[in-house]
């Protein structure tokens, strides 16, 4: 084995030359292309980042505008809601006032109509009641009612003041001897006439011979007619008085 | 392969200078590499073609490897280290070409490459740290380490040379012996193994040179000076 210094030197020189040649023909062009592409990529990336930043700024601006619009919308809605609430309140108050007025007017009208109707009904009812009573009393009165009426008349005579009773006695026991007339709604039988004559004489304090008549208009009443004095116990008169009171007074209201 | 790989035959003389066969083979390899590079980089475009993509991938890979190892801008070191890998790999693969011997199977070529690495380490170290700063690296961590560091500079260069020479020479020797003894097809597995060995040795040589240069240009990494 021998170490050739010329070969060593030539190989060293060859290597250096090769480094230079490859640097010129290989590395520099390839690295240049790579660098150029990296620069283009960096520029593209920078452009994209700038565009992204611009887009982000635009997005933020739009978000701010949208937020402002949202706030304005909310304020407008709130104002509209408040105005609507106020308007509603006003309308409700107005409607309530109108309703109260209408209700009061209706109530007044109703009360008035009700009073009129009640009054009219009362009058009709009074007339109807009186008519009913009249019709009922036009029937032949019961004996008990007739007796009661006769007894009441005798009692009335007994309760007359002494002076008035003497005056009546003078009328029927005087020179003219005018007999009292007993008017009834229904004819009395003989026994009843005799009994009543006795009771009448007892009430007057002197015998009496009354004349008996019939007047259906008395309606179960008794009327004793002296020459200048009339004693009456008749339901017809009472009914006329009651009807007058019910119709012309506030009896109808009471009935209603 | 009939002749011993330990002998260097002279192809011709240039005046008083004997030009041996490894030198001629190296010239052929250089011409091929440079011509191929010139043709491949003739029309580089922004949208790379297939060849351009391969070139860019190879250069970028070497650049990334340098950046990861040196942790510095790889551009100043790329031509030297990439040429080292390309030349050694190409030379080693010449073992597969019938009738050619790899220049790296001869000690002169490996020695020249190792010396180039030795010089490059110092050149890059001085360029990065200055004369004073670079020379101060040899006295770290203490002055006691100065002789050992100086010796390691020589021994690691020597180990580079011997490693490459031993691996490639032995492969060529084995292929030559098997080829001379057995025939045509039996050496094929050995040739495939030599292909793998050649690429691995080129990678190891380049990475070690990268590490040496990295240790020279970076003060913090200067103390473990002799990984070889």
Image (cartoon, rainbow, N blue to C red):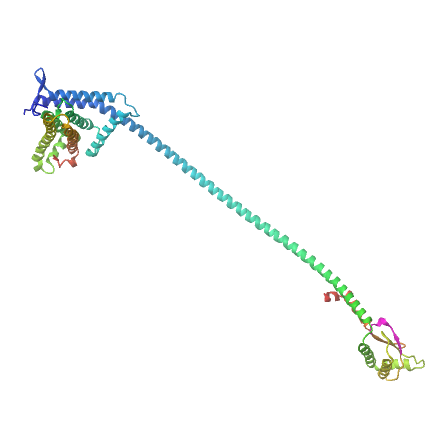
Quadrant in which the N terminus of chain A is drawn: top left
Name the quadrant containing residue B8. top left
Outermost residue, right side:
A175
Q: Is residue A189 left or right of residue A10?
A: right
Relative to residue B198, is residue A84 depicted above or below?
below
Q: Residue A126: x and y, percent? A: 77, 66
Outermost residue, left side:
A1
Q: In this view, does A100 lie to the left or right of B171?
A: right
Q: Residue A171: x and y, percent? A: 90, 80
Of the pair A190 and B207, the residue shown nearer to us: A190
Residue at 71% in and 58% down: A113
Q: Does the magenta stretch include residue A218?
A: yes
Of the pair B75 and A11, the residue shown nearer to us: A11
Q: In this view, does A101 lie to the left or right of B217?
A: right
- Residue A248 appears in the picture as rendered: no
Magenta residues span A211-220
Of the pair B13 and A108, the residue shown nearer to us: B13
Q: Residue A236: x and y, percent? A: 82, 71
Q: Does the magenta stretch include residue B185?
A: no
Q: In this view, does A56 lie to the left or right of B38?
A: right
Residue at 87% in and 74% down: A214
- Residue A173 appears in the picture as rendered: yes
Name the quadrant containing residue B45. top left
For the image, the number of numbered tags is 0
Q: Residue B53: x and y, percent? A: 27, 27
Name the quadrant containing residue A121. bottom right
Quadrant in which the C terminus of chain A is drawn: bottom right
């Amino acid at each position: 084995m021998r170490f050739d210094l010329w070969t060593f030197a030539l190989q060293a020189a060859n290597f250096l030359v090769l480094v230079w040649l490859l640097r010129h023909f290989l590395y520099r062009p390839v690295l240049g292309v790579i660098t150029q592409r990296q620069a283009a990529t960096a520029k593209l990336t920078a452009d994209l980042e700038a565009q992204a930043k611009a887009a982000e700024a635009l997005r933020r601006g739009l978000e701010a505008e949208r937020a402002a619009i949202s706030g304005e919308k909310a304020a407008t809605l709130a104002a509209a809601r408040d105005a609507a609430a106020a308007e509603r309140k006003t309308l409700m108050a107005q409607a309530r006032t109108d309703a109260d007025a209408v209700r009061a007017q209706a109530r007044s009208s109703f009360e008035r109509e009700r009073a009129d109707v009640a009054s009219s009904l009362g009058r009709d009812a009074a007339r109807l009641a009186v008519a009913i009573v009249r019709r009922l009393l036009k029937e032949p009165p019961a004996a008990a009612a007739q007796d009661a009426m006769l007894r009441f008349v005798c009692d009335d005579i007994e309760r007359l003041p002494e002076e008035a009773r003497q005056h009546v006695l003078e009328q029927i026991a005087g020179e003219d001897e005018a007999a009292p007339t007993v008017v009834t709604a229904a004819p009395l039988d003989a026994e009843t006439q005799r009994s009543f004559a006795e009771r009448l004489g007892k009430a007057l304090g002197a015998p009496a011979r009354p004349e008996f008549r019939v007047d259906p208009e008395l309606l179960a009443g008794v009327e004793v007619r002296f020459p200048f004095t009339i004693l009456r116990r008749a339901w017809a008169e009472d009914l006329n008085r009651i009807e007058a009171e019910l119709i012309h007074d506030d009896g109808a209201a009471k009935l209603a | 392969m009939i002749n011993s790989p330990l002998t260097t035959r002279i192809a011709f003389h240039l005046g008083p200078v004997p030009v041996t066969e490894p030198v001629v083979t190296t010239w052929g390899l250089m011409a091929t590499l440079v011509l191929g590079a010139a043709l491949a980089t003739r029309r580089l475009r922004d949208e790379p073609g297939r060849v351009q993509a391969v070139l860019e991938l190879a250069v970028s890979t070497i650049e990334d490897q340098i950046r990861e190892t040196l942790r510095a801008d790889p551009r100043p070191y790329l031509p030297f280290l990439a040429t080292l890998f390309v030349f050694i790999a190409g030379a080693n693969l010449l073992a597969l070409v019938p009738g050619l011997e790899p220049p790296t199977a001869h000690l002169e070529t490996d020695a020249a490459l190792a010396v180039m690495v030795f010089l490059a380490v110092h050149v890059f170290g001085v360029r990065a740290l200055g004369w004073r700063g670079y020379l101060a690296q040899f006295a770290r961590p203490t002055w006691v380490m100065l002789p050992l560091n100086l010796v390691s500079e020589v021994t690691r260069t020597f180990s580079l040379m011997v490693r490459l020479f031993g691996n490639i020479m032995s492969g060529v020797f084995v292929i030559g012996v098997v080829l001379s003894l057995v025939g045509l097809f039996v050496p094929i597995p050995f040739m495939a193994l030599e292909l793998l060995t050649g690429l691995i040795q080129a990678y190891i040589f380049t990475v070690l040179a990268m590490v040496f240069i990295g240790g020279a240009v970076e003060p913090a990494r200067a103390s473990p000076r002799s990984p070889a």
